[in-house]
Amino acid sequence: MPTLGDYLLVSGLLFSIGLAGVLLRRNLLIIFMGLELMLNAANLSLVAFARHGVTAFGLPDYNAQVLVFFIITVAAAEVAVGLAIIVALYRLRQTTHVEDLDRMKF
Amino acid sequence: MDPHLYPWIILFAPLVAAGLILLLLPRRNAAAGVVGIATAALTCLLSWKVFLQPELAVTAQIPWLDIPGVFAVPIGVILDDLSRVMLVVVTTIATLVFVYSAGYMRGDEGIPRYYAALCLFLFSMLGIVLADNFVMMYIFWELVGVSSYILIGHYYRKDSAADAGKQAFLVNRVGDFGFLLGILMLWLATGSVMFSGIEQNLSAVTLHPGYLIAACLLVFCGTLGKSAQMPLHVWLPNSMEGPTPVSSLLHAATMVAAGVYMLARIFPVLLAAPEVVRDVIMWVGAITCFAAGLMATQQDDIKRILAYSTISQLGYMVVGIAVAPVNDVAMFHLFTHAFFKCLLFLCAGSVIIAVHHEQDIWKMGGLLPRMPLTALCLVAGTLALVGCPGFSGYYSKDLIVAYAHGANTAVFWITAGAALLTSFYMFRLFFVVFWGRPRGSHAEHAKQSPAIMTIPLLLLAVAAVAAGYPAVSKHFFALPHGEIPHIVHFALLAALLGGLALAALLYARSPMTDPVRVPLFANRFYIDNFYDWLVARGQGGLAVLSSWFDRWIIDGLVVTGAARTVWATGYVLRFLQLGNLQAYAFFFGAGVLALLYFLVFR
């Protein structure tokens, strides 16, 4: 039976991989996947806390699990919007490489 | 009409007239003159009526500023022997000068403005005379200053006239500042600004002689400014830029005497004050009367000679306040001086008109056969001024000098010396202007001025001769009876004859230029130059300093500095805007990490 620490370790690893992907990869789609990975790392830790944080009635804490459902829903919506933006950007600039998208400066 | 209304009518009629002239008759020269003269005549008539009814002792008051228990300033009139005499003097002379002005100002473009200002002056002067409390007197004191400013600057297109008006106002402001402080100190100590209240509660202050000395000397500062005593005398000679009737009424007969009148009004306070107050007043008066006499001996402008003579005579009055046991001694000289000095100025005005607005006495000469009436009046005024026996100045000046003899030997000799100077510069003026032969074509073709100017002259000449006779003065003053020491008579007679002889010796042969040249006196002891230097250096330096402070500290450091700081910070920070998405993400992540570190581990 894995402990809470194991879950949190996996969650941390997932978050770090996601952050590294956001910071280091050049392709916008990969960066977007890194973002999703970070969201799911947060979901994993929330579910782990819910499983291990037992309430006074001996039942799991469902509040955290409800929050996870919300995050999944919002993430789905966000993916739709984000991918749409990326498609629009690609149509405009014919690239998804962030190094070519450096016009946001003075 | 109810006689109790007389003082109020006397006070407010000139104000109504001034408003009437300015609002309804701004272009009507003749109408403005008629309104002005009629108003002055009305006040004169009522003043004589008030004077001849000694039982009419009005002390009516209108409450004005009233903070119960703290401060009460009514608008009130006081009618006692002092104000009655002053009312008569002011309104009588004002009427004559108003009439004379109609002749002198003929052809001037600003006659309504002139008469309105004269009426305003009359209102303010009567306010000073009738005021029963210090605050009211101070208000009218300032109003007199305003009307003086307007009238000195009547020929405002001339820079010198405009500057002289400004100078008169500013120099008076110096004295008035002290005056105000003195009033506040007396109010603080006695709890009243009424003259009667201050006198009643004076015992509260006499226990603190230092406080009383300071209060009295600060009040005396008002006299320094208004009565042109040393060292604030510089404005009076420059005020001669105004029209001659103005010089005659304001700057010789009445307004400049307001300082002396104020001292006479608070005479009981001065008597109760320590000796040192009266000593200071005496010495200021003595120094002024001698120094102004010295300056007068070397002036070339006919009006400036008379102006310095006025300062000198005001010095006598101030000495009279300090040395005599009653205020009537100084007021007696004020009374006689008002008539003969007004006469002298009006004679000078008559001469100036006759020689086409020339004021330099070295361009006149030989006017005696050409203007005999003016010459006669000027001689009468001169003899009164120098104190010739049988003329009014003889009685009043001798009285002051006699009391000075009793008080302080040095002051006696100074005042006697000033009498010698008076005699010298007045006969110098007479010889140069009227004796010998003309020094120019204007003087050659001079003619006697019209009747509207000579009739006031003749009336004033009668007053200048007769005002001092005991038969006349006993109706106006309660002069102390006492034998005047023989040495006083001898000294003053010797001074008179000595001055006459010296002037005759130097000037009777009609020299073309002044045979005596004393630059120190001609340049008025360089006091004016010193003030110019002081203003240029002191005030100019201060201006440079504050300009520097404003430009570099306020403007440079604070205002522009704040803007520059924000701009520079922004300039540095904008280099963080790389445009690289991942760099932003990195900053964001690093920021969150740093925040977590500080929140959790610190």
Image: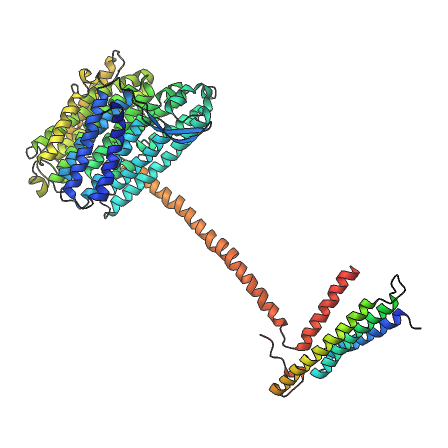
Occupied quadrant, residue B366: top left
Left or right? Give the position of A17 relative to B151: right
Occupied quadrant, residue B534: top left
Q: In which quadrant will I find the C terminus of chain B? A: bottom right
Q: Position of residue B397 (x, y in %)?
A: 24, 21
Residue B113 in sight from this viewpoint: no
Left or right? Give the position of A22 relative to B207: right
Viewer-side residue, B75 vs B393: B75
Left or right? Give the position of B188 relative to A102: left
The residue at 78%/72% (across/down) is A68
> Is residue A63 placed above or below A94 in the rendered structure?
above
Q: Position of residue A101 (x, y in %)?
A: 63, 81
The residue at 13%/24% (across/down) is B462
Q: Residue furthest front?
A: A57
Viewer-side residue, B253 vs A84: A84
The residue at 54%/62% (across/down) is B564
Q: Residue furthest right?
A: A1
Q: How is the image coloured?
A: rainbow
Q: Position of residue B206 (x, y in %)?
A: 45, 19
Q: In which quadrant will I find the N terminus of chain B? A: top left
Residue A66 in sight from this viewpoint: yes
> Is residue B483 placed above or below B447 in the rendered structure?
above
Label count reads 0
> Is residue B597 placed above or below B280 in the rendered structure?
below
Q: Position of residue B287 (x, y in %)?
A: 32, 27
Occupied quadrant, residue A80: bottom right
